[in-house]
Image (cartoon, coloured by chain):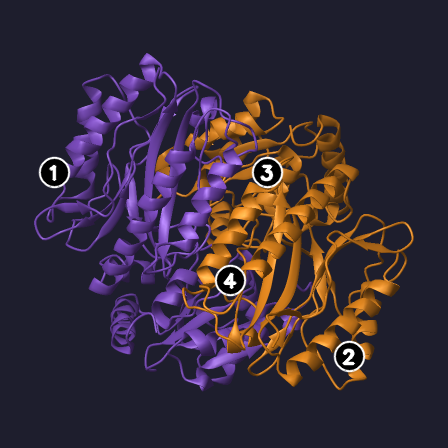
Chain colours: A purple, B orange
Amino acid sequence: MTFSTLEYKERIRKTKERMMEKGIEVLLITDPGNIYYLSGYNGWSFYVHQMLILIIDEDQPMWIGREMDANAAKVTTWLYRDNIIPYPDDYVHSETKHPMDFVAGFLKEIGQENRSIGVEMENYYFTAKCLERLKKAMPNSVFKDATLLVNWVRLIKSDTEIEYMKRAAVIAEKAMKAGIEMINEGVRECDVAAKIFHTQISGTEEFGGDYPSIVPLLPSGEKTSTPHLTWTDERYKDGDAVILELAGCYKRYHAPLARTVQIGKPSEKLKTLASVAVEGINACLDMIAPGIACEEIEETWRKTIAKSGFVKESRLGYSMGLNYPPDWGEHTVSIRKGDKTILKPNMTFHLIPGLWLDNYGFEVSESIRITENGCETLASMPRDLILKEYV
Amino acid sequence: MTFSTLEYKERIRKTKERMMEKGIEVLLITDPGNIYYLSGYNGWSFYVHQMLILIIDEDQPMWIGREMDANAAKVTTWLYRDNIIPYPDDYVHSETKHPMDFVAGFLKEIGQENRSIGVEMENYYFTAKCLERLKKAMPNSVFKDATLLVNWVRLIKSDTEIEYMKRAAVIAEKAMKAGIEMINEGVRECDVAAKIFHTQISGTEEFGGDYPSIVPLLPSGEKTSTPHLTWTDERYKDGDAVILELAGCYKRYHAPLARTVQIGKPSEKLKTLASVAVEGINACLDMIAPGIACEEIEETWRKTIAKSGFVKESRLGYSMGLNYPPDWGEHTVSIRKGDKTILKPNMTFHLIPGLWLDNYGFEVSESIRITENGCETLASMPRDLILKEYV
């Protein structure tokens, strides 16, 4: 098992505390990260509807999923077999049946329909149709918004989770170095991406890697003006800059990392941008400590780069760790103006001061853990613009 | 550009035809596959809300997305710059603001709020919260369910799309062979997965690979009783069977492929299961042709395996081609009882007669194209249980 039963039970206890605060008696959990967090369930089956049901006065959650995935639940979770409830395959991608009809029928059967039911309104895996079908089948139920309820429980990591993230960081660093090593004039973007993937999944001799929730992002040339492009099969040219954003992943826990590489001579404007961003992130890393509010980090960043006349509109970072595609972020805390979350030890963030301008950009990032008296980066690599074959 | 402007315009025309049939004047498209299909937009930014708006009496759709992704829209789409509308970053993962508030404001601004508005109710990227916020901001608008409206347009592929899928199949076959080659006693699962990933992304010397929407699935040993497990860092043992399900991907078009490998001596029951499944899929491939209903394929399969006393509850296949994580399926046609879709040339399916029993299983699959008078498999590989180091 990935975590001890004791750790799962503690997570359930904390989740129930939040349910009570919100007056939720039955929690329908559709976020695959939350399902994994509470049950251990782990498979690429989230492309069909599946759910964990946590009832306030029951010890164990129940898993509902597609029949062919029930054996995966038996293999990966700490749940009793009776708590693994499969739905028939004709509910999958059907024009008439919907898995939420099955869920509603099940909730009625076990006498839970008249209780206060929490649903994750803002989650990829709880569509508008899901709510519509549940409401139709259970017209007398009261539905409450439980978006991020479990995610907030996940904010402070246990020592085991930190250990997994540190392993992820070892992989991230290895993958980043492999990518940087390979980038050069005449090399195809897809071959660099392939090398990064290989390193991410193969991991180290001691432990293998899991798939990160986002593929490597590696825009080059003018495409560095935007962060979320993947790769092509074109060859790098002399003068291209390449932004690399990737993560290592171990047992679904991530450590993202971004660096920028220059093939040949960098432009003066990129050199300036890089030094401003690196000065900014260093200033943040120096001041981050427990007791500080998230927005204070952003303030430090903003004031540092303002000295050189730069402004960044987008957020500076976010809470991350456990997740499934399409995102490794946890969607709770953002490091930006207005976020007053107070830092505590074992919170983990991706601090990513990317700057994307009209036709160029620069990224440097660190995955960090809040320590007892400051913060530590999970990986350890120089932050400056990386020069390849500088002429 | 990935497709000619002519091809995009033809897709828009067909989409508008369906909008008219359904009485939809403004279509809000959130499925990343549909967004790509109509605009060319391609980036890993679907983890935040983004949308293509197609108005019945406008020539071009409009893209709405996060500010930092607007440059990606400029790089990858055929849209006029004026049709690329960024929303500010503080709408991202916010407890107070939601991107659908921005969308509603924009629709009001351009005088579209009183028209009939189609939304993709059943899509990963249109959450229950999306609909709630749209309805709240536009209380007088009429919302109609436009789930799969564009997906149905995608059912029959153009020659360019078929060419992309054939390239994907070349990659799939190469990745499958690389995986099979490497599987052996003492080898770690993660190292096989890494090799597959490398082959998928690096592609061939002529063209590189894109990321498939599902990672390689490779359950081994007793875990072959379920299809959607990924890998661990454990080492294969003599006697393990391994199911490999993977896809090649080229410019977001997929060709999935599944095979089963046996390390050492196979059990008699697995040999039986394999020969039944292979006989079943071969019988289907022989009878598939334009004019046949999808459910007739399933009937052929069912009757063929029934002769040996086997039953399969899950569907036999589904329409596939273009998609983004978490699925390569198109969610329209299923090859199963009750699906009366009539086959036409250039429809493409993943025919996957997997059989998962209590503690073992077998998968073999083909990506197929309906031809003028039958069908062709996109890849070309023997279908039998693959024996490694048979003693």
Give the CA separation, mark 3 to mark 4.
Answer: 25 Å
Q: Amino acid at mark 2?
A: Ile
What's the mark number on residue B133?
A: none
Q: Residues within 10 Å of mark 4 (few under 14, many from 20)?
A: many
Contact, CB < 8 Å: mark 1 with mark 2?
no
Residue at mark 2: chain: B
Q: Amino acid at mark 4?
A: Trp
Residue at mark 4: chain: A
Q: Amino acid at mark 3?
A: Gly
Q: Quadrant of the N terminus of chain A?
A: bottom left
Q: Residue at label 3?
A: B208
Q: Residue at label 2?
A: B305
Asked where in the image residue B360 lies, by quadrant, the reply is bottom right
Q: Residue at label 4?
A: A44
Residue A215 position within the rendered picture, expressed as x and y whole percent measured from the top left: 46, 45
Q: Earlier in the sequence, mark 2 or mark 3?
A: 3
Residue A205 position within the rendered picture, expressed as x and y whole percent measured from the top left: 34, 58
